[in-house]
Every structure is written in C-alpha cells, then in structure tokens.
Amino acid sequence: MSAMANGNPADGNALGNYLKDRRARLDPAAFGYSPDRRRTPGLRREEVAQRAHISATWYTWLEQGRGGAPSAEVLERIAQALVLTEIEREHLYLLGLGRPPEVRYRQPEGVTPRLQRVLDALPPCPALMRTATWDVVAWNRASSVMLVDYGLLPPGQRNILRFIFLDPRARAAQYDWQSVARFALGAFRADATRTGAAALVQPLVEELCRLSPEFDAMWRDNDVVGVHGEAVKHIRHPVLGPLAFEYSSFTVDGRPDLSLVVYNPTTPGNAQRIGALV
C-alpha cells in the first residue's frame, strides 16, 4: 500500500460504488478476456487491478470503501484501466481525493460554432477566446475593431504576447505599457505552468527574448500573477480616443485550458460609440 496517500477518500462508499459501476460497463472481450463463466457483467476486480498495476486486494478494498485514499498516480492508473472519459476521470478524482486532477493541456483546436455565437452575441464588447499559451483562437467583430484584427494575422502569429511586445500599436494604445506588459507576462507564466504547457511555450519565449529586450528582462524576473480574472483596462483608440473597459476572464466549461475574455465598456456612452463604429 506504499502508493496510498495519507487520509481517506472524500467519500469511500461513493468511490467504491463508482468503481464498481464503471467496471461493470466494460466488455471483457474488448480487453482480450474471455466473457465466459462470469457471474456479473463487466471486468473482474483482479482484471482491473492487473490493468492498473496495483494489488488486487487493495483494489477490492477500494470498491468496498475501506481502502484508504489512493494517490493521484494510482487514481490515474485506475482511470486508464477503466477507460474513463475526461468527465469520468475528474469525478473519480473528486471522490478519491476531494479535488479535480491537474489540468492536461490540449493543443489549440479552434472553437465550436456555439462558442463563436457567444462571442458574436456581444456586439459592443470586444471578446475573444485564448488558450493557456495565450494563442487567440476566436474573436468577435468588436475585438477586431477595438483591439487587433487577428483575422489579418497568420494563424501562427495570433498570440497576445506577440502583439504586446512586438507590435507598435500595442504600445500606442496603452497609457502605461510597462505595467500592462509586466502584468500580462506574469499572468501568462502562471497560466502556462498551471495547465502543464510550460514546455510547449518555450519556443515562443525564446523567440520573444531574442526579438524584445524588454520581454527578455521581464521574463528573467520570474514574476507571476495569481488572480487575473477581472480588472479595469484603459486604452487609447485611434478613432474613439480614451476608453475604459471592465476586463473579465472566464474558464470555458470542459476546456480548463481555454478562456473567454470580455472587455465590457464602463459607460453606456462608450458602448454606444463602440457599437456605432463596429
């Protein structure tokens, strides 16, 4: 039982019932086991234990609600052995450890038409979808007019940090570019680390360090920003002049590595001016 963590599962009986239910849903033949002479449907306990590389006795205890709290590593093995979906895997962690699993970063794959319609339903509010590596994968018309038209950029260049540090328009739009850039970089570092994407952003970091001395200096400071879900953002627009937005960021349900970012005009007057320009 050396792989067990200290403490007890959030709910031992619920965990055991969930394991039994998932086990009963599996087809033995799909895993190379004979379906003959089985008193109950699904895999046997020892077969799941074998697939998860854990003790059959301990797995039996887990199903009986008396196995103690398994480690995250063991829960991951059991999730793979039971061929759980991402939602089922998260539920297993919540029952076994009282917390969700660490986020698995997923490469950008665009957004569904439903999510794009959400963006388009916010005509006076610039809004976009960004990944944990701050690549922009979707945006609305207001975002193109008020911030930057990502549709004019090659897909590999649609990154918020690239815009902030390499595009003169970003400096012209900010009243305090240094503070904005440092804040964005700290939030980016936290997002990449939280979602397990730190290694994937290394080529981008190396490129920006080479092209922007300011990025290089700020990156070496190793600052991180913990909470960056909301703030007030002031910009200078080339047509409308000074504008203020309430900035809000929301994690997309089912995609913890994808965020919806909305810039809500702080006054009805600003919203009307933006709406007319859009």
Image (cartoon, helix red, strand yellow):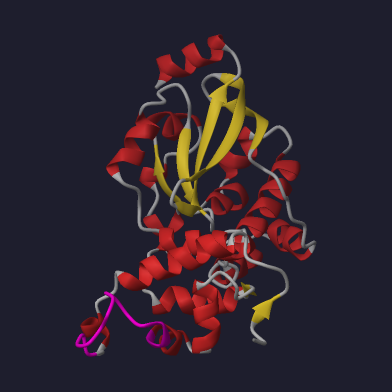
| Residue situated furthest top in the rendering | 269
x, y percent for residue 76 = 51, 75
Is-magenta flag for residue 35? yes
- Determine whether 30 is above or below 184 in the image: below
Task: Check the picture and name the quadrant holding the N terminus.
Answer: bottom right
x, y percent for residue 42 = 29, 76
Task: Check the picture and name the quadrant holding the C terminus.
Answer: top left
- Determine whether 30 is above or below 133 in the image: below
The quadrant in which residue 221 appears is: bottom right
In depth, the one of 39 and 153 nearer the eye is 39
What residue is at 27 percent from the left and 85 percent from the top? 31
Question: How many circles with numbers are drawn on the protein?
Answer: 0
What residue is at 67 percent from the left and 33 percent from the top? 231
- Determine whether 82 is above or below 105 in the image: below
Q: Main secondary structure of the magenta part?
A: loop
Is-magenta flag for residue 244? no
What residue is at 62 percent from the left and 75 percent from the top? 71
x, y percent for residue 95 = 55, 61
Judge left or right: residue 25 versus residue 90: left
Judge left or right: residue 40 versus residue 125: left
Judge left or right: residue 86 versus residue 213: left
In depth, the one of 214 and 250 nearer the eye is 250
In depth, the one of 210 and 124 nearer the eye is 124
x, y percent for residue 90 = 49, 60
What residue is at 48 percent from the left and 48 percent from the top? 130
- Determine whether 14 is above or below 175 in the image: below
| Residue situated furthest right in the rendering | 221
The quadrant in which residue 119 appears is: top left
| Residue situated furthest front in the rendering | 39
- Residue stretch in magenta: 34-47
The answer to whether any part of residue 103 appears in the image is no
The answer to whether any part of residue 245 appears in the image is yes
